Image (cartoon, rainbow, N blue to C red):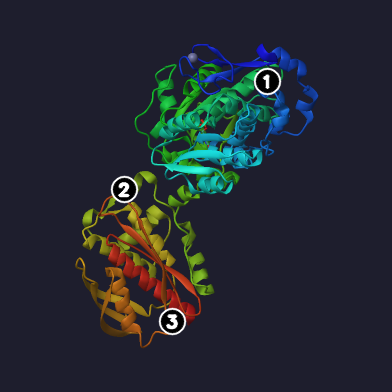
Amino acid sequence: MTDGKFYHLECIKCGSKFDERKTATSCLKCGDSLDAIYDYDFIRQRLNTYSIKNAPISALKYLDFYPIIDLENVVSLKEGGTPLYHAENLGKKLGLKNIYIKDEGANPTGCFKDRGSLVEITKALEVGSKAICLASSGNMAASCAAYSAVAKIPCYVLVPEGTPIGKLAQTISYGARILQVRAPYSRCAELAVETAKKHNFYLAGDYVFRSEGQKSQAYEIIEQLDWNVPDYVIVPVGCGTNLSAIWKGFLDYKEVGLIKKLPKMIGVQPTGCATVYEAFDNNKKSVKRWDAIDTVCSAVAVNYPLDGNKVLKGIYKSKGRMTQVTDEETLNSEQLLARSESIFVEPSGALGIAALCQLAKNKIIKKDDTVVVVATGNGLKDPVTALKYQPAPATLEPDLDDISSYLNNKLYNLKATQISMREKELWGGQTPDINELAKYIEKEFGITITGKCLEGVHKNVARFITRGKAISEQDLQAIIEINLQEFSSKEAVLRVKDFELSVYRKKRAHAKLEIDFHGKRISVEGEGVGPVDALINGIRKGIESKDKLNFELLDYVVKIHTGGTDAAVEVRIKVNDKSGNEVVGAATSPDIIQASVDAFVRAYNALYWKNS
Ligand SMILES: *Cc1c(COP(=O)(O)O)cnc(C)c1O
Ligand SMILES: [Zn+2]
């Protein structure tokens, strides 16, 4: 090998060889991915087999298998050494005996990318880089930011607008210079290449050095299975770097004689961006770019996977396969894994479980097969998606009777509607009678509600329908959630019976209201900068003489449930009183003003109960 190096870089397609000072990203001739080709004789000679077999697992144990020349520069956060769980509960549910979960969420920044950053950031220092630059859908950003912080070099990151909040929070906290770009990941990746060139930054990303670092997952799996090779390894595919890396790790161990056979590799993608699956399904050797993609799995939402062709090579060679799963299957798997094995992953991290369920059902994976599923990232990275498809937990008054009543009625059993049912229209524009409604809720949402709570839901449903708004399952779920939040045996002191608004451009809004306060009907008028302000000012005036709370509006949040201007909105209003108590009232309606009034009235009543 040249330069006393024990490896060189080579294009996976045209075979051109490159010096890493020329390119360590993609082939300068054909643009495909690079691979590091080793002198395995050299590795075998210097390999300390005793240490490999006996030292505790950790990504640093495998330095002999990384293309690092000067170990002085190594940047490490003690990555790797993640648990491999024997998933007995999950296995029982699927009729499988030997299911193992490699929990990559246990890495320093909560994702396998740290293994790659170990090698990549080390290489950046080795070639004397002064700053690094990359595009990311979030996890690589957090990882590179963390490694750059300890390496004491600046890190510039381009992420798509709307990147999950856990990942953004990490990246910012590690001190990276983060740019949110109004474009999908693939455009960010192109821009990162150009930015790196123009500003002379080291370009990090799904390239060969990262891939070499991520091989350690395979080494650890072998050791954790007592030096046995699993039958299958299931890996989510975004850019495809990780699946290729894990496959390469198994090849390395076979080359140096640590294992005799190889596993079958199974890659999994969401149906909304199944680029590699499509190529596999058509027996192709190369992956086509997709124009548009659509999935909740943001970490794999890639329309052109840089290492897609590398993945195909590994899949064919290992006699494995690609699979595709729907977002619904993935989100159900996220819950299934958490509930059966107490491993909480982000949606992309659950893809492997979704694939496992599918392959078990189709009898492709059999009872005695040993299967390792790579759970790629920690669930706290993207809590918003997990919450979005789960019912919001109820909020109760601090009252033991209310708590007992809630528990006795088993209202914690509230299930979320299935994603495929969310848009389904209910009752075709006719308000159901209250018993029919109760039955439907029992069947679809798993709970029995009665009394005031059921009446509240019924009234809310009727209001949707009389306003001419089709009611969907998702709307109904929101209505139930909100009424459960108001789950209380107490009587409301404030009610708004009716209101009328006049709003003109360039004039203050004017409201006329009929309210019930402590059982007394009051007619009032109010003015304000906008309609909601005018209504609340009217209420304030009406209750002035008897109001002891001296409430103040602290926060006003509007969330739109579905698309379009006729969407149902959810309003949350936070109020406090003069002694500093704070409560939130929530309501949902196709009419934002109605939702605001309802939310305010609920907040006021809750505040009143707090004071009495
Ligand atoms: C990056 C990432 C993936 C996809 O890995 P690739 O190497 O891009 O194929 C999957 N899951 C999570 C959580 C990730 O962060
Ligand atoms: Zn090439």
Q: 241 or 401: which is nearer to us?
A: 241
Residue 208: percent from left, percent from top: 57, 24
Q: Are dots 2 and 1 in contact, CB under 8 Å? A: no
CA gap, disc 3 and disc 1:
72 Å
The residue pinned by badge 2 equals: 423
Residue 301: percent from left, percent from top: 44, 35
First in residue order: circle 3 vs circle 1: 1
From the image, state whether disc 2 or disc 1 is nearer to you. 1
The residue pinned by badge 1 equals: 253
Q: Is mark 3 on a helix, strand or loop?
A: loop
First in residue order: circle 2 vs circle 1: 1
Q: Is residue 366 at all visible to an observer of this figure?
A: no
Q: In which quarter of the image is residue 501?
A: bottom left
On the rendered image, what quadrant is the N terminus found in? top right
| Residue 500 against residue 563 in the figure, above or below | below
Which residue is at 47% across, 20% downward? 309
Does residue 51 appear left or right of residue 102 in this picture? right
CA gap, disc 2 and disc 3:
41 Å
From the image, state whether disc 3 or disc 1 is nearer to you. 3
The outermost residue toward the right is 50
| Residue 499 against residue 23 in the figure, above or below | below
First in residue order: circle 2 vs circle 3: 2
CA gap, disc 2 and disc 1:
50 Å
Residue 385: percent from left, percent from top: 46, 47
Q: Quadrant of residue 539?
A: bottom left
| Pointer 3 local density, CA inside 10 Å: few below 14, some 14–19, many at least 20 | some
Three-letter amino acid code at the position of disc 3: Leu
Which residue is at 32% across, 51% downward? 562
